[in-house]
Amino acid sequence: MRIYHLISFFIIFLSTACSKYTIDNESGEEIDVSIQFQKNTGGETFETEYPIRIFCTDVSGKSVKDLIFNQGDEITFPLAKGEYGINVFVGLDENDYTLKDKPDGKQMVTMKNSSMAEKALRAAHTSLEIDRQTDINMIPAYVVASAEVELSNIPAGVKSVRIDIFP
């Protein structure tokens, strides 16, 4: 009888001690994501203008993070494992730009003062799957939605006018 109890205890001990434990991401575990900026594909460092605003969306387009980084902040933030769209706006100053809701509930950036801004706005976007600590290198590009030019006092004899606009 004593051997029976000892064998039963031994079997129970082995079955629990050798079990495979799976740790899934449902526990809320988050992974650090770090963003660096480059001027070009050659890796030249980008002179960053602040503030930096980062919007992260899940695969359905739902916003999951809305972050603001100021000068001196390390641009690192946690995300759960999954697929994301990461949208970065460099120089998104509240004095020049504002966020407005579009009819579909998503936000868009607009200029405040008569469609003019003192600071240039740059943006970068990437889509990726986060499954481990991730470093992202982004190349922000100038963002221009539209430009309006009004010409006045043009002499009657002028046959053409050429305007070149560059960022």
Image (cartoon, rainbow, N blue to C red):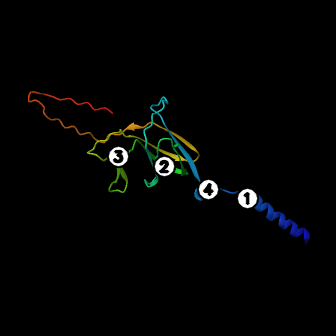
Residue type at mark 2: give it. Tyr
Residue type at mark 3: give it. Asn
**For the residues carrying marks 3 and 4, which lies nearer the camera in this image?**
3
- For the residue pair 166 and 62, the one nearer the viewer reads as 166
Pointer 3 or 4: first along the chain: 4
Q: Measuring 34% from the left and 46% from the top, which residue is drawn there?
A: 97
Q: Measuring 54% from the left and 47% from the top, which residue is drawn there?
A: 130
Residue 95's mark?
Answer: 3
Furthest residue in direction left, as rendered:
156
**Horizontal placement of 102 versus 152: left or right?**
right
- For the residue pair 141 and 18, the one nearer the viewer reads as 141
Residue type at mark 4: give it. Asp
Marks 1 & 2, CB-CB < 8 Å contact:
no
Which residue is disc 1 drawn over? 19
Furthest residue in direction right, as rendered:
2
Name the spot of residue 24 as percent of width and height, x first.
Answer: 61, 56
**Horizontal placement of 33 versus 162: left or right?**
right
Pointer 1 or 2: first along the chain: 1
Which residue is disc 2 drawn over? 84
Q: Is residue 108 above or below residue 41?
A: below
**For the residues carrying marks 1 and 4, which lies nearer the camera in this image?**
4
Q: Is residue 144 above or below residue 58?
A: above
Pointer 3 or 1: first along the chain: 1
Q: CA distance from mark 1 to mark 2?
A: 34 Å
Name the spot of residue 78 as percent of width and height, x first.
Answer: 54, 50
Report helix, strand or loop for mark 2. strand
Which residue is disc 4 drawn over? 24
